[in-house]
Image: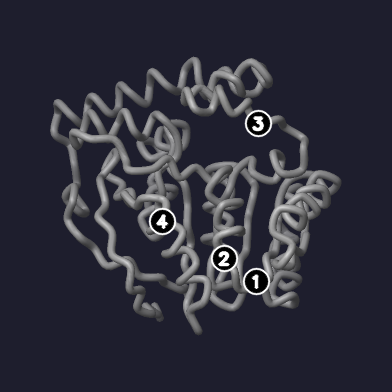
Amino acid sequence: MKIFPPVSIRASQRPILDLPVCDFDWENALSFADEVSRLPFGQTVISFLNANNANFLVDDPEYRSIMERHVVLPDGVGMDIASQILHGAPFPANLNGTDFVPALMTYMTQPRRVALVGAKRDVLERAAEGFRRHAPWHEFIPVADGYFDAAESDTVMAKVRAVSPDILIIAMGTPKQEKWIDTYVGPGHARLVMGVGALLDFMGGAVPRAPESVRRLRLEWLYRLTVEPGRLWRRYILGIPIFFRNILWQKFAGHTIGHLQPGAPARLRSSSKG
């Protein structure tokens, strides 16, 4: 059975590689996430689409199907360029998870319980402490690192249920985290669930953020490549050209499913499995 509690905020969505992506500005994105985290029932999953995981949409039907059930926010300069090519304008805001989640924590003035799953154990603990310094009125609970065996997943989620969080943050990397959320996370675990990639590594100090000047230039991807070339060269050196090839193919071949046409208003709803 699906449960669809009403959400008052309305947003338009733009298809990127046939996946509807919300074109919230910052204020409406934060208001939306705050509101769904306070709903009395149901569950909303927020995921972030960037050039890297957009490439998975082309070759992984399971991942695409899962993302179509999530509220998807645009992450990075690649999404802006793709939106400019396909729809004539960039997205109103770069709502990448690394900035969005800390901003959401400070935006929410009502204390929340936030469960954290992912990263290495020591990094997870440091990330929880970093969040506590950032927004001390919330309770941040490190539940499990991201290196447990798949057979332990139900045990991990039983621990999540036991702490009764309002918000659940999962950091396992794409597409693993989205598939894991789809399989193991249900409405009894949290009202708002977010798959956040490397956020806990940033919050825990395991990976440095680019300087503010580099971020303003929209070059954080290049900074990350210089910091972790062995891990990220395929993502950026190979992945970026593939992404824009796919975008141009959509533009000129016209292969768009068109779940929602650009600018068409859609009432976003939170859903739950059950």
Q: Residues within 10 Å of mark 4 (few under 14, many from 20)?
A: few
Is disc 1 in contact with disc 3, using a CB cutoff of under 8 Å?
A: no
**Earlier-in-chain disc, 4 versus 1:** 4
Where 173 falls versus 216 (above or below)? below
Is disc 4 in contact with disc 2, using a CB cutoff of under 8 Å?
A: no
Amino acid at pointer 1 = Arg
Residue sitting at 35 percent across and 78 percent down?
6
Q: Residues within 10 Å of mark 3 (few under 14, many from 20)?
A: some
Rendered image: mark on residue 112: 1
x and y, in percent, of residue 126 in the image = 82, 48
Q: Which residue is mark 2?
A: 108
Q: Which residue is mark 3?
A: 209
Residue sitting at 36 percent across and 74 percent down?
7
Left or right: 221 as drawn, with respect to 70: right
- Between the C-alphas of marks 1 and 2, the distance is 8 Å
Q: Which residue is mark 4?
A: 27
- Between the C-alphas of marks 3 and 4, the distance is 23 Å
x and y, in percent, of residue 1 in the image = 40, 81
- Between the C-alphas of marks 4 and 1, the distance is 19 Å
Amino acid at pointer 3 = Arg
Mark 1 or mark 2, which is nearer to you? 2
**Earlier-in-chain disc, 3 versus 2:** 2
Amino acid at pointer 4 = Glu
Amino acid at pointer 2 = Met
**Earlier-in-chain disc, 3 versus 4:** 4
Helix, strand or loop under label 3:
loop
Residue sitting at 67 percent across and 65 percent down?
114
Residue sitting at 38 percent across and 46 percent down?
61
Mark 3 or mark 2, which is nearer to you? 2
